[in-house]
Amino acid sequence: MVENNRWGNLLAHIILIFGVAIVIFPVYVAIIASTHPSGTFLRGVMPLLPGPNALENYKTVILEGRSRAGTPPISGMLWNSFVMAMAITIGKLSISLLSAFAIVYFRFPFRIFFFWVIFLTLMLPIEVRILPTFQVVADLGMLNSFAGLSIPLIASATATFLFRQFFMTVPEELMEAARVDGAGPMKFFKDILMPLSITNIAALFVIMFIYGWNQYLWPLLITTDPEYYTIVMGIQRMVTGGDSEPLWHLVMATVVLAALPPILVILFMQRLFVKGLTETEK
Amino acid sequence: MASITMDNLHKVYTGGVRAVTGINLDIADGEMIVLVGPSGCGKSTLLRMVAGLETISEGTLHIGERVVNNLEPADRDIAMVFQNYALYPHMTVFNNLAYGLKNRGFSKAEIDRRVRDAAEMLEIGAFLDRKPRQLSGGQRQRVAMGRALVREPAAFLFDEPLSNLDAKLRVQMRVEIRQLQKRLATTSLYVTHDQLEALTMADRLVVLNGGQIEQVGTPMDVYSRPATTFVAGFIGSPAMNMLPADYLRSTQASDNLAHLPQAADLIGIRPEDLALETPGDGDLSLTGKLLLLEPAGAESHLHLKFDGLHENMIIRLPHVPSVIEGQALSFTVRRDNLHPFDGATGKRVS
Amino acid sequence: MQTKRMTFSSKWLPYALLAPQVIITVIFFIWPASQALYQSVLRQDIFGLRTEFVGLDNFVRLLNDPLYLNSLNVTFWFSVGTTFLSMSVALLFAVMVNRMIRSRDTYTTFLVWPYAVAPAIAGVLWWFIFNPSIGIMPYMLKGFGYDWNHRSSSTDAMILVIIAAAWKQISYNFLFFLAGLQSIPQSLIEAAAIDGASRMKRFWTIVFPLLSPITFFLMVVNVVYAMFDTFGVIHATTEGGPAQATNILVYKVYRDGFVNLNLGSSAAQSVILMGIVIILTVIQFRYIERRVNY
């Protein structure tokens, strides 16, 4: 190790602390704003120290919402986001595990063809096929439903590739041993392959949950019924819902609640998150 | 317990690569057969065909009375020990042993009894609750053995089971496997590329080369009467010296070579059959220059250059002689210890 | 493409296993994409009663449309700005964190979580900070004599959305740079030190070139992110304005399709976007293959 000098380290710490402060600042400001009464935002500059209204503001957004702007209480939106995120995550993981298993552990006609079909999903993000996809979902009667919110988003080439890559590293002999031990394909999948993949599944779970929770454009398109609003898109409705200045204290309380679940997931599962991120994108 | 019969077995891979061609072999009940050969000789493929992990392209395979060509590995009543052990990393030792029994619907009590019996036999009883990664190489090897034992199968298949162990452990496990196999008297097919392992463990060994059998026989058979130059070169270390018959004819008394068949144009001499002695009646005498003396404690290997011979010869002596490199040395070899081969076909002639 | 040396044999099982993924892909990806292709050569009259085949006319119109050309231009600068800002800040952080031994994990924890924040929320947060009447940034900038107003100034609006989009992406770039730095053999840096290279020189002549595969990979990923994942940033804040200044391609395709209901043009825009994604994906994957060997 080439020795670090002390002044260099001090400088590095200063840069990092400053950097961390900048990175945290927006969320700090949001948390502070969410503790103030609405009056604070009518004049002068935004507050940088906590105010007295935290409980009241959070109670308002969670239980009452803003009826004037047509946004429901966000407890419902939080629930919707959770259901959508979980449905997307579990859906993506299950169908990707199954397809990767088929592609690695079987030889069959059109195998490569199917692989490319799955690969295509990488090249067709929702943003480039907005209208026709909306059309399909509308024709299937899936507007304003959890099925419509989640199913079209669960095809995943990245997860399939990751599992494929992982399965390829599982020693050949494990499958052979399992066969000698009398396990058929699905038994092998369940008893051996799934338990071996558990860390990968968990790592992807973290990434997928964040992906699902943070969906914005899709829920925006297919939900017109406030029943099905998700929290992330709900914020936009709150910001632009009225003609006047947004009610910053309530918006920011909502922002904090919307951002909190995925942030907590990352903080508590940092190791899995880093693994999931760096391995899926390779 | 069962015999295994291979009748004209062939393996042709898609793409036309012929891994195994025309193998005929009868393995008696309780016999330990070792398949030995260089890498790529088809020994593992043959073993995997018996296991059911490779399909049989042609020929019939019996295990016991049944033709098992189209049976799944699980239905062949065999157990296999893999080179890298193939232990299920997420299961405890107990569950590793029990998995095959569970899949076959054995009762809990029966599974428990069998696992504990096997664990006791292999002295792994203390590790039953551990995961494979918490075990040493030798312990994993025992668990892999245990997984085969609990099944009480008709045959054990071993795919180079000792090649991942260090030299010392390998000798120890070799002895244990052989003792266990003798005690249980289970028909066994054992694949290795290590000729010493083959010689020490086998009831009969099968030398394979290029997908075909070169020789089948007891270890002493194969060692003392190699059927081909390939076997002569593969079994025994250092390898048998090969010299042209013409060289001997030009340097030795013709009486001493009279017993050699006319067709023999290549003569093999084992390194240990040459001695630093004065020739007696009926002995050949060879003189060469010592290039290198390799002392190895109890024995020594001498590398010599003979006039008129392209290849160097290796001689093994059961002691370390006091000689110096560059010195000319005379060796004797009994004429019964010459192995005559036909150089063109590589076959032994008699 | 490989399978295992030995595979299970079943005539129907692999198809059953693939079915869910393939069916969803066909219904929600391939079919709509082909619809976009199909609609991109059609035009509807204003009442939506008649549809006629117009060939490549939608594309020709698009490429002659100053609004679309503006959107291309805006997208370009937005992508470049976002990529450059987030990558350079992330690299700086990664190099600094990589010096640390005991505090490395703590700093990492503080720097990774913005990844979890949705682009739309990132937009709202920065929009709030830069709010012309109450935001802290305009207040401070006023101190320097700059009158910030992203509602009227195109430049200000662009800077705002770039900062918001880049902020969220710093975590991602940081993690990859840090992983890259940690994979550089210490012996190389020691050798350079023995060869008399100063710390700065070691960074620019040894470390940075060795990071170039990761830098290139991140560039592609960041451009993809800026072009396609930042819809929320725009939609929740500037809504493309002022005066089209932040009207990036994905926002425009949404506006033209859903708000202005111009099917043909929206479809043609989709097709162009598809082409861009395909090119970027190919670049990314060709590169990854090299990286595996690297």
Image (cartoon, grey):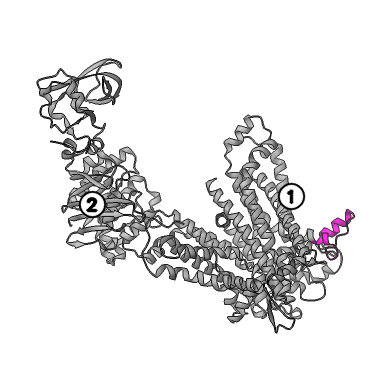
Identified at 71% across, 55% down, the residue is A23
**Residue range highlighted in magenta:** C137-157
Q: Tag 1, which chain?
A: A
The disc at residue B22 is 2
Q: What residue is pinned by disc 1?
A: A18
- Relative to C5, does residue B228 appear above or below in the rendering? above
Alpha carbon separation for disc pair 1 and 2: 76 Å
Q: Residues within 10 Å of mark 2 (few under 14, many from 20)?
A: some
Q: Nearer the viewer, residue A167 or B291?
A: B291
Residue B69 position within the rendered picture, expressed as x and y whole percent measured from the top left:
25, 61
Q: Residues within 10 Å of mark 1 (few under 14, many from 20)?
A: few
Which amino acid, mark 2? Gly
Residue B22 position within the rendered picture, expressed as x and y whole percent measured from the top left:
23, 52
One can see residue A59 in this view: no
Q: Give yes or no for residue C138 being in the magenta stretch.
A: yes
Q: Quadrant of residue B342?
A: top left
Q: Nearer the viewer, residue C45 or B184?
A: C45
Which amino acid, mark 1? Phe
- Mark 1: which secondary structure? helix
Q: Tag 2, which chain?
A: B
Q: If the image is split into quadrants, where does the N terminus of chain A sit?
A: top right
Residue B238 position within the rendered picture, expressed as x and y whole percent measured from the top left:
26, 31
Residue B222 position within the rendered picture, expressed as x and y whole percent measured from the top left:
18, 39
